[in-house]
Image: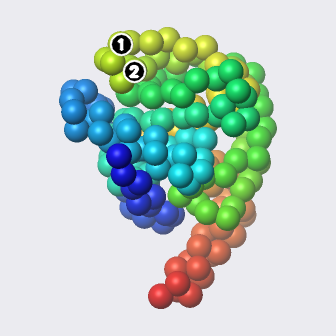
Amino acid sequence: MAILDIKKYPARVLKHKAAHVAVIDDELQQLIDDMIETMYAAPGVGLAAPQVGISKRLAVIDISAREESVPLLVLINPVILKQEGEIEFEEGCLSVPDYTAKVKRAENLVLTAIDRSGNQVEIETGGLLSIAVQHEIDHLDGILFIDRLSPIKREFIKKKFKKKQKTAV
Ligand code: NI
């Protein structure tokens, strides 16, 4: 296993719509293991493949630090089938370090995905897991949580990160 480099905003790979996963082979299993290790090391509660520079529809989520009973989830080609309600939560992202903001999302979800054994699964979620799933699926569509903020807040964060890039050199 290996800890992968996490791409930070404004890396272009974060803006791309990721490709459908066609085969679950050894290479993908390796990527899944590395993503899990990278997520735990960060630490974070979720990580999508585009965040490590791989534009594929794959994400890992583990919110057990917040809700013990929820197992580690590996989602391949996830699709939201149903959503309802509204919930607001202070979100952060490993690709947008040192910034959090309140984002509104659906409270309850039904989704389908392929697990790492290749089985099609249907998952019903609510609350924090539902927020994490929507955040990670957004990554697969090239959307960051800051894209869901008001234009004023988005401009603020863009400026902040431009400044940071300049000073980092
Ligand atoms: Ni994120």
Note whether ligand 1 is within 8 Å of mark 2.
Answer: no
Query: How would you rate the neighbour count of disc 2 (Cα within 10 Å): few for under 14, some for 14-19, many for 20 or more?
Result: some
**Rendered image quadrant of residue 129:** top right
Left or right of 32 in this view: 105: right
Which residue is nearer to you in this view: 35 or 156? 35
Residue identified by numbered label 2: 115
Name the residue located 25 percent from the left edge and 27 percent from the top edge: 24
Q: Position of residue 148 (x, y in %)?
A: 64, 48
Q: Position of residue 58 (x, y in %)?
A: 39, 35
Q: Mark 2 falls on what kind of element?
A: loop
Name the residue located 35 percent from the left edge and 13 percent from the top edge: 119
Q: Which mark is residue 119?
A: 1
- Whether label 2 touches label 1, CB < 8 Å: yes
Q: Position of residue 11 (x, y in %)?
A: 43, 64
**Rendered image quadrant of residue 153:** bottom right
The amino acid marked with disc number 1 is Asn
Q: Position of residue 27 (x, y in %)?
A: 22, 38
Q: Is residue 75 visible?
A: yes
